[in-house]
Image (cartoon, rainbow, N blue to C red):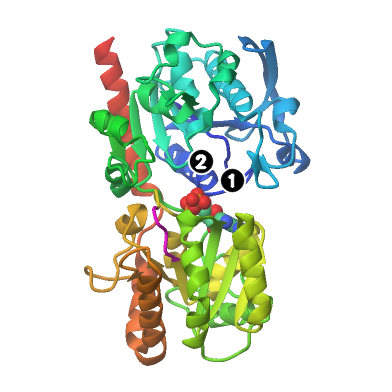
């Protein structure tokens, strides 16, 4: 089985969120299971500047909306890089200074076309696995060109980002006008690239079973619930895992002292170290951590709303993230108002993420919706108890106290201020007065299997199913 895994970001080369983690760890695990899986992504400026050794593979030319487009293709280990300096040699992957690049459709349709051309160079590819809107045009091009020998899987990592563009940009795509219809790529007059992926891929999946159900409802469907319901026969959900070699407290070189279930002493050292990093005062207070994009999806507005009460309950809080300017400013102002108790770092910092995961006692994830979420699983592996809402992957991956055997987290019953506060107060009470229960939750969390093995097996089965289904149809 040969798979071309198309993604606009992959760790460690370029990362803005969970997609990069998945695009690194899943192909790695698939290769371990005997599947020949190669990743293809754009060659961003930061990748070139990182100095990784790049081998020239081939040159590609094709007809696009701009005339003849060309690019060079490089590789490093199991990853191909599409080079086009006009499109990809800039600061940021999709945006700069909080604003999306105006030529994103041109950039990622170019990338998608290049992936299609690369298929011919690679020879017999069974499956093209596309991820999110940036590679959602690939199945559309395969359809438009009548290329049938390859099957496609489209994975929705977050339905909230659909790649919507003004129809005046249509000529860029060099697709027949009949593709811009409401039953294909048009969405109330706009071009909707994610819709193209859903319509034209042989199968579609999301990154957790619950999210696959939720997006078929108006509440979570971001306007595409009708379409998703209509294609439910080809829609499934497979929960993500985490890269358990990158996220392993026993071998993590980025934290103050390694620790494990058998030898947990290092966790206290990591907590002290975290306090030092954020100049928090010493003491017996529980430390709550939060890492992520500062957008409403992640419930950052709810967290900001309860900070005074959380601190009044005797807890400390550290937040690492970047995103909407309004939240960045509010958090900075609050950290100045509560020195020694609230630590805030605005930015993207992998090393600090490890320090927070290792040093915190609880991890806040009060998301309003969550396709899967990785931080709750990373937290569990680090013995940091996740506090999560009952949505999407947070429902599927965390057994909360009172919900089943071997609980390893706490539930925020709804994405509301009051529910979040209630869960935080419960967490503080467990930490200070019910030490045995706290240690049981920690132990259960660390024992939980959160690696990619089982989920990768599910992907392998799905690939086989798509391939056979397509062969039968031919
Ligand atoms: P998303 O919706 O952003 O994809 P996930 O929970 O699926 O959320 O994955 C987020 C990933 O990005 C995790 O590995 C998390 O640790 C990382 N991350 C998010 N924001 C930051 C940040 N500011 N600094 C470092 N890592 C971050």
Q: Is residue 246 visible?
A: no
Position of residue 461 relative to residue 419, above or below, is above
Magenta part of the protein: which range?
365-369
Residue placed under numbered mark 2 in the picture? 23
Is the C-beta separation of discs 1 and 2 under 8 Å? yes
Residue beneath the point at 58% across and 73% down = 318
Position of residue 331 relative to residue 339, above or below, is above
Q: Earlier in the sequence, mark 1 or mark 2?
A: 1
**x and y, in percent, of residue 372 in the image:** 39, 51
**x and y, in percent, of residue 358 in the image:** 54, 71
- Compared across the picture, whether 119 is left or right of 76 comes to left
**x and y, in percent, of residue 270 in the image:** 58, 77
**x and y, in percent, of residue 410 in the image:** 34, 72
Secondary structure beneath disc 1? Answer: loop
Q: Quadrant of the N terminus?
A: top left
The alpha-carbon separation of the residues under discs 1 and 2 comes to: 7 Å
- Compared across the picture, whether 444 is left or right of 67 comes to left
Q: Is residue 109 magenta?
A: no
Residue beneath the point at 43% across and 22% down = 186
Position of residue 411 relative to residue 295, above or below, is below
Residue placed under numbered mark 1 in the picture? 11
Residue beneath the point at 41% across and 68% down = 386
């Amino acid at each position: 089985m040969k798979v071309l895994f198309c993604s606009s970001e992959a760790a460690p080369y370029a990362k803005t969120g969970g997609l990069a983690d998945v695009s690194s760890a899943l192909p790695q695990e698939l290769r371990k299971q005997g599947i020949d899986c190669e990743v293809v992504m754009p060659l961003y400026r930061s990748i070139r500047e990182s100095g990784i050794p790049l081998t020239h593979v081939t040159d590609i030319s094709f007809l696009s909306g701009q005339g003849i487009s060309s690019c060079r293709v490089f590789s490093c280990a199991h990853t191909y890089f599409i080079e086009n300096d006009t499109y990809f040699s800039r600061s940021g992957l999709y945006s700069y200074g909080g604003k999306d690049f105006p030529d994103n459709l041109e950039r990622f349709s170019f990338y998608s076309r290049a992936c299609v051309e690369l298929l011919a160079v690679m020879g017999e590819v069974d499956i093209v696995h596309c991820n999110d809107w940036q590679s959602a045009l690939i199945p559309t091009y395969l359809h438009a060109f009548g290329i049938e020998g390859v099957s496609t899987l489209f994975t929705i990592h977050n339905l909230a980002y659909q790649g919507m563009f003004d129809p005046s940009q249509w000529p860029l795509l060099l697709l027949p006008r009949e593709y811009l219809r409401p039953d294909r790529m048009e969405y109330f007059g706009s071009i909707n690239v994610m819709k193209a992926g859903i319509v034209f891929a042989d199968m579609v999946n999301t990154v957790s079973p619950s999210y696959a159900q939720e997006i078929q409802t108006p509440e979570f469907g971001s306007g595409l619930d009708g379409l998703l319901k209509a294609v439910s026969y080809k829609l499934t959900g497979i929960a993500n895992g985490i890269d358990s070699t990158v996220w392993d407290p026993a071998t993590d070189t980025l934290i103050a002292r390694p620790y494990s279930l058998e030898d947990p002493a290092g966790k206290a050292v990591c907590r002290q170290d975290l306090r030092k990093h954020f100049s928090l005062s010493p003491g017996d207070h529980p430390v709550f951590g939060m890492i992520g994009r500062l957008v409403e999806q992640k419930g950052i507005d709810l967290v900001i709303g309860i900070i005074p009460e959380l601190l009044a309950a005797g807890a400390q809080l550290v937040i690492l993230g970047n995103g909407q300017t309004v939240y960045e400013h509010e958090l900075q102002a609050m950290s100045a108002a509560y020195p020694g108790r609230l630590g805030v770092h605005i930015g993207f910092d992998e090393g600090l993420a490890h320090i927070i995961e290792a040093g915190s006692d609880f991890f806040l994830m009060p998301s309003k919706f969550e396709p899967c979420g990785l931080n709750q699983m990373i937290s569990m592996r680090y013995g940091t108890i996740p506090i999560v809402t009952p949505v999407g992957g947070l429902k599927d991956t965390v057994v909360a106290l009172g919900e089943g055997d071997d609980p390893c987290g706490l539930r925020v019953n709804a994405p509301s201020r009051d529910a979040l506060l209630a869960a935080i107060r419960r967490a503080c009470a467990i930490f200070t007065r019910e030490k045995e229960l706290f240690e049981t939750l920690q132990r259960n969390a660390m024992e939980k299997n959160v690696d990619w093995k089982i989920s990768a097996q599910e992907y392998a089965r799905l690939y086989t199913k798509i391939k056979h289904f397509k062969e039968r149809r031919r």
